[in-house]
Image: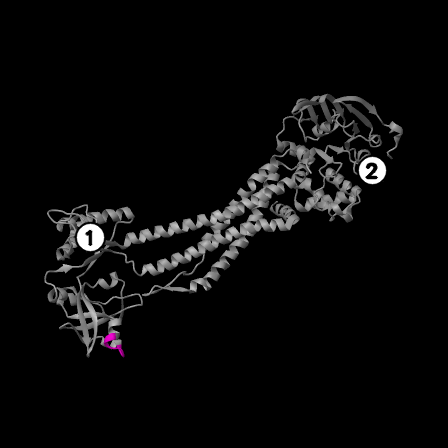
Amino acid sequence: MIRDLLHEIHSTLRQNKLRTALTGFAVSWGIFLLIALLGAGNGLMNSFMGNIADFISQNVSVSGWMTSKPYAGYKENRLIQMDGEDVLYTESDKWGGVIGDITLETPSTSVTLSLDGKTVSGAIVGVMPEYLEQNKNKMAVGRFVNQMDIREKRKVIVITLAQAKELSPKDPEGVMGRWIQAGNISFRVAGIIYTDERSFSRYCPIPYSTYKAIYDSSDKIESITFTVNGPTTLEEHRAFEDKYLKGLKKRHEVDPDDRRAFWVRNGYTDNLEMTKGSRILRIALWILGLLTLVSGIVGVSNIMLITVKERTHEFGIRKAIGAKPGNILSLIIAESITITAIFGYAGMLLGMIGCQVMDKTIAQDSVDLGFEKIQMLVNPSVGLDTALEATLLLIIAGTVAGIIPAWKAARVKPIEALRAE
Amino acid sequence: MALIELKDINKTYNNGQPLHVLKGIDLQIDKGEFVSIMGASGSGKSTLLNILGILDNYDTGTYTLNGTLIKDLSEKQAADYRNRMIGFIFQSFNLISFKTAVENVELPLYYQGVSRKKRHDMAMEYLDKLGLTQWASHFPNEMSGGQKQRVAIARALITHPQIILADEPTGALDSKTSVEVMDLLTRLNKEEGMTIIVVTHESGVANQADKIIHIKDGVIGKIEENEKHDAWGGSLIK
């Protein structure tokens, strides 16, 4: 029966090739735009995610900042300086495993690094071994600060590749293991951090204990960074942040409602927000594409209405010789679906080719942001799931487009239809 | 028992002003009869034919076809009865223009759900019977009026209907072809015992029938037995 139906459709569609083609074009165009939009959107998201993923670490980082409200006799705009006590607070048992690995960073001390008469500026900062991982830095050569360094307050330093190049242009990696001067103190270079184009960093990590002993006996802490286990949703993360900050605010005599006294960067919620953002972008693109497609569907529906009117007499004949209303209904809807599906698939194919063309052209361009280059589109394409969704969409669209004309055709009385010309 | 039994059929059209078209029609047609219905335009003969063909419904009375009461049918049921019990022949042939002769003949069987192969074979058989084998794959616009009407007759016969309803079957044909078509219908009646009802306003055509029913102003005027085919001198030539 399906074959018969297809045969019926074929013989009617070839009746008016130009009209069929023009109608189909609207659908092709709609699907083409939908696929191209989604492809470009995916490319944009891939690019965005790829660029941002390097910055966003899965952890929470807290720093002291400036109060926004007067409290307990203090005026507003007081600078908050965290210290070792805050680290103990973070390490305390009361978090019950929610806070995982903890690392910290001391305030930095600017120094001039020198070796063999060459100098470069740097900023000494005291860190824990986890600093490397938490900051997503990579070693170019050597090793990072380790537990042994911390315990023994070793005078070791990790410098950046850029600094190493300044100190030893001919053999940057040769700086490894050598003693360099930082101000009036000597450190042995334990490792060199890889610096890519986007990094300006001139921070030179040394063991936290060493920093405390040499530069700052008052144990000031610039930031505490830790992983969090447990909270999953945005709300849970916010609740945890509030709970964590409540204790800090109490310690530093800050108004509990002061939102500015501490600066919190939460990688988890950033990530959640980004996922949400990408979902919204995707939905927006779908809506745009669908709206375009709607005009195609209206076109099909319109043409089917005209066709039905023209073919009223034919439907009268069919009814007289035994076609049931359901036969006529399914004939028209099947015709509508056929037009929509065939041209829709053509559009989809073109859309996918369009994505490939985008990949080969626009996606190859990159935008120079000064400190780094960003590729605008990364792998702009749509997946198989999208193609399947679009297929389903086409069938639904075809049905929707055919329903009203089909209903009109099925409803017409045979004698009236036979009388029509 | 009569094949067709009409009892006090009334039909009124309500297009603005009520128009009482059929005013109590009583009629019996037996199996194997060849009947013509004659009347001027506006006499109600077309309405009667539409009711007989289950294309239109009636207001009061009863219509029984082969023991089945035809009343208040759903569209679907009506279509099914039309398909199985009635073969139509129209003045303007009513072939589907974008289908070939054989596809047109197949169509009633398509709506019965007969397989592609079987209905093609049957359609070819009927086209052969009517001498149209070589025209099977031609489209209607490639055929003459007589050929088209024979295709239409093949289409009407293919479902083995109880009755053939012909509405001015020669109206669009020249005299010679008219004779051929009427002879064909006569042969179907005599040789295969097919019940045939022809609506016409041409006396020559009506004369081919064994019984002539005159309808005037929505009532049956007289029923003429015409076994000898001598009404109006018996000539079909216009």
Position of A10 with respect to A122 (left or right) is right
Residue A196 position, x and y percent, is: 30, 68
Q: Main secondary structure of the magenta part?
A: loop
The front one of A421 and A244 is A421
Label 1 crowding class (10 Å Cα cut-off): few <14, some 14-19, many 20+? many
Mark identifier at residue B178: 2
Instruction: Say what secondary structure mark 1 lies in.
Output: strand
Quadrant (top left, top right, bottom left, bottom right) of the N terminus of chain A: top right
Residue A321 in the image, given as x and y percentages of width and height: 68, 37
* Residue under pointer 1: A262
Question: Does the magenta run of residues contain B204?
Answer: no
Where is residue A228? Give x, y as percent. Answer: 24, 53
Q: Closer to the observer: label 2 or label 1? A: 1
Magenta residues, start to end? A166-171
Chain bearing mark 1: A
A55 vs B163: above or below: below
Give the x, y percent position of residue B105. 72, 42
